Image (cartoon, grey):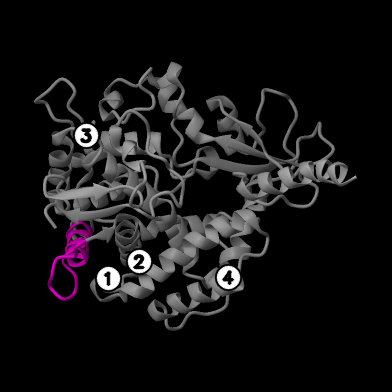
């Protein structure tokens, strides 16, 4: 009898374990199947991003495009109390928000120069410490999160980034990360974490209100949340991966000194495989897309119920037939030879109606500036990178043979320290 009961309980236990550890990104809305159908081809993913479907069927999506995108993103409303272009079903508001965001990130050459200088100052202050002594060991993820968030705040709201409270900044970064992960697991992220985030925001925004549309996170989340991880991965590839080329860091240093669009796109001529800063950033965006899977809710005219579908952007970026047999290797020089099929498969900033406002200029160039500032301040010859807790075997991730593990919580044990310290 006992054995029978145990056997009967196994399927339920397996389901619970699967649910807890599954990669489901958004809780489904009413009438939507529990688990999304995931598509891996560029053509299907492009249709999903456009909210038109996922196949060549004549069936039409009966939801509006803003509804298709907004429904899966309601988890972000519950987690962060936001109302922005990603979560609204009001297309007029979406367009106004998009225009407002675009105006915020349109920087002059002088502003780009100031951002480059500020990033170096912020990194230098962190590495030395406020007491003027060199830090013996620094968590690399915390450093990248702090710098990315401070620069995002500088661009969007213009505070004095050098005077921002470091503890509050790291609290904001940590709370965003935990709430983001928690929103994928539960319809009701922890109130305690929400309050910690709000308290930390209040140190920077003393007049923080309760209106969702006035929440500064409406702008902070799109600018910071996906950027810090691509900065982290790109910097590791450039500075510490065994396959890294010395010329990459030098090229980025030149871009840091002259952070113009022309310099960003300029390829060297000294070698046949010369690359540009843009090539380095694009390769990082290919191998580590800021959003690995994009979700839409579709209600096709031939279906009785709406369905949750996912466009697997990471899969599109790693198809050997499109990108080559070395598709899992970080090789920026591939961008001098990619064809139209690769450019159509490259979707790190979404596509169609909902292409990110940062796609054409701000996003890639900002990643380049922050990676360049890190590479200039943390030279591989002077610094060492330790991956994983003592006794772990995670150091093999830097072999260059495989991509880095891009899980959100995967780099909490990554430390940098000066050689000989």
Q: Which residue is mark 2?
A: 153
Q: Is residue 47 left or right of residue 241?
A: right
Q: Which mark is residue 212?
A: 4
Q: Residues within 10 Å of mark 4 (few under 14, many from 20)?
A: some
User: Are the residues flagged by discs 4 and 3 in contact, CB closer than 8 Å?
Assistant: no
User: Are the residues flagged by discs 2 and 3 in contact, CB closer than 8 Å?
Assistant: no
* Residue 300 in view here: yes
Q: Which residue is mark 3?
A: 244
Q: Is residue 303 above or below residue 171?
A: above
Location of residue 87 in the rendering, given as x and y in whole percent from the top left corner: 60, 57
Q: Is residue 238 above or below residue 325?
A: below
Identify the residue shown where x is 24% and y is 56%: 108
In the rendered image, residue 314 lying in the magenta stretch gets the answer no
Q: Which residue is mark 1?
A: 161
> What secondary structure is marked by label 2?
helix
Q: Which segment did they paint magenta? A: 115-136
Comes first in the chain, label 4 or label 3: 4
């Amino acid at each position: 009898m006992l054995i029978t009961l145990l056997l009967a309980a196994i399927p339920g236990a397996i389901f619970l374990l699967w649910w807890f550890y599954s990669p489901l990104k958004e809780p489904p809305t009413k009438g939507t199947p529990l688990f999304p159908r995931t598509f891996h081809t560029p053509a299907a993913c492009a249709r999903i991003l456009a909210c038109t479907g996922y196949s060549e069927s004549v069936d039409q999506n009966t939801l509006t495009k803003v509804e298709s995108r907004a429904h899966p993103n309601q988890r972000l409303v519950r987690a962060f109390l936001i109302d922005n272009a990603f979560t609204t079903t009001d297309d007029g508001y979406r367009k106004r928000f998009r225009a407002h965001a675009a105006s915020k990130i349109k920087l002059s050459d002088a502003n780009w120069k100031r951002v480059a200088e500020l990033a170096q100052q912020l990194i230098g202050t962190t590495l030395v410490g406020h007491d003027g002594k060199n830090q013996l060991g620094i968590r690399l993820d915390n450093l990248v999160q702090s710098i990315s968030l401070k620069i995002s705040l500088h661009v969007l709201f213009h505070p004095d980034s050098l005077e921002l409270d470091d503890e509050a900044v790291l609290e904001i970064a940590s709370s965003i990360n935990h709430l983001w992960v928690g929103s994928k697991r539960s319809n009701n992220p922890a109130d305690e974490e929400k309050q910690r985030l709000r308290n930390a925001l209040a140190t920077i925004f003393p007049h923080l209100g309760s209106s969702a549309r006035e929440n500064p996170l409406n702008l902070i989340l799109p600018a910071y949340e996906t950027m810090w991880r691509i900065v982290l991965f790109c910097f590791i590839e450039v500075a510490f991966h065994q396959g890294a080329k010395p010329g990459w860091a030098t090229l980025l240093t030149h871009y840091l000194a002259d952070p113009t669009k022309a310099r960003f796109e300029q390829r060297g001529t000294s070698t046949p495989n010369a690359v540009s800063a843009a090539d380095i950033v694009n390769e990082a965006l290919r191998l580590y897309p800021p959003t690995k899977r994009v979700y839409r809710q579709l209600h096709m005219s031939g279906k009785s119920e709406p369905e949750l579908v996912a466009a697997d952007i990471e899969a599109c970026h790693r198809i050997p037939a499109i990108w080559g047999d070395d598709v899992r290797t970080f090789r920026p020089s591939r961008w001098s030879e990619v064809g139209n099929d690769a450019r159509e498969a490259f979707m790190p900033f979404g596509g169609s109606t909902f292409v990110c406002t940062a796609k054409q200029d701000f996003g890639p160039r900002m990643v380049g500036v922050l990676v360049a500032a890190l590479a200039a301040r943390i030279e591989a010859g002077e610094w060492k990178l330790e991956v994983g807790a003592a006794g772990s075997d995670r150091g093999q991730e830097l072999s260059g043979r495989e991509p880095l593990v891009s899980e959100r919580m995967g780099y909490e044990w990554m430390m940098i320290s000066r050689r000989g310290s």
